[in-house]
Amino acid sequence: MSTPLQSLPNNACEPRAQGGEGSKPSLSIVIPAYNVAPYIEAAVLSALRQTLHDIEVIVVDDGSTDATSVIVQSLVDKLKDPRLLVIRQENGGLSAARNAGIRAARGEFIGLLDGDDIWLPGKAVLHIEVMVVDPMIGITFSHSEYLTEKGERTGHLLLAGNPRPSLHEMIRRNHFGNGSTVVARRACFREAGLFRKELRSCEDYEMWRRILWLTSYSAILVPKPLTLYRRRESSLSFNATKFVSYADQAMEILRRDMPHVPERIFRAGHAEHYRIAAWKALSSGHRGDAFNLLRRAVALRPLLFFTDWRAFGAAVGLVLPALAREHFTAAAKALQKDRSKITPLEGI
């Protein structure tokens, strides 16, 4: 069960290690951090260096066992910025870390930034401007640019698929792209509850759809690449079984809680999860898993190869040798880069 925000106890998380007592900020940026020592400083600094100064930055150290805690504490000691707050807790997973940050947040708006990603300086102000103009917009999201693991900007964009997705469109596909693009009203979590801790993957997929289902708020794109999304080598060690297990669980929750949504919408969304899992399995060298996942996707949506070029690309990748597959992937990325020219990176 998800927990409504208004019912949470005041002592639901550990006290802030640092922070000011002034007026409430407009925006709270929540940064869940678990074993992200090489990246956490860049994430925190990108949040603090937003052109919108009326913010607080809440780092939730989710029981890290590497140097994450030391690095975060050194930033607190060095910067002495009252906007920087720290929560430390035993490891509970991404959902539990985000929930702790949301509970502690004081802002009317709450932004999510994973501990290995980066916000560009103008992101906060652009999101807040959109939401202030229209009080019925509950969620804003943006395009993203890929980073290498070392933090080098690639120029390749992860483009959001729909500028104003409906609930049905969001069930069919995750139009937000990744977990670091979203800024939401605090009221969304108050009305719909927090992230489900039992979901260790697909938790954001379920959360954003629950908000669109249970509240009157809508979601809208801020059409600029404002998030830098890091692609880490460790992500290549993909566990298809775990991902699919959580995807199945998330879809089961949606089917149970949204009985008026047509089954064909759920089947399309379920097929999309299997399509994503197939591509990840193929990228990590698990060709057998990829084949089985694509077969499951097509069973749910028989015309998938004809309606989704990404599924067709995964199928081609299965039959091509490695060298040809790399060439095919490079060509697809080049095509995506050409498309990205519609939203230039300059001046952000």
Image: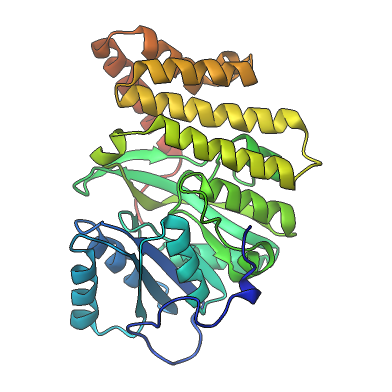
Residue 19 appears in which quarter of the rendering? bottom left
Lateral position of residue 145 relative to residue 343, left or right: left
Q: Is residue 283 visible?
A: yes
- Above/below status of 22 relative to 340: below
Lateral position of residue 286 relative to residue 192, left or right: left
Residue 248: percent from left, percent from top: 57, 35
- Above/below status of 171 relative to 121: above
Towards the viewer: 137 or 193:
193
Q: Is residue 162 visible?
A: no
Residue 55: percent from left, percent from top: 43, 77
Residue 226: percent from left, percent from top: 41, 54
| Image quarter of the C terminus | bottom left
Residue shown at 44% from the left, 24% from the top: 278
Residue shown at 23% from the left, 60% from the top: 65
Towards the viewer: 315 or 134:
315
Towards the viewer: 283 or 176:
283
| Image quarter of the N terminus | bottom right
Question: Which residue is farthest right?
Answer: 260
**How many numbered badges does the structure rendering display?**
0
Residue 10: percent from left, percent from top: 54, 83
Question: Which residue is farthest bottom?
Answer: 21
- Above/below status of 273 relative to 153: above
Residue 338 appears in which quarter of the rendering? top left
Lateral position of residue 276 relative to residue 148, left or right: right
Q: What sort of colour scheme is used for the picture?
A: rainbow
Residue shown at 62% from the left, 33% from the top: 269
Residue shown at 49% from the left, 33% from the top: 244
Towards the viewer: 291 or 89:
89
Lateral position of residue 255 relative to residue 21, left or right: right
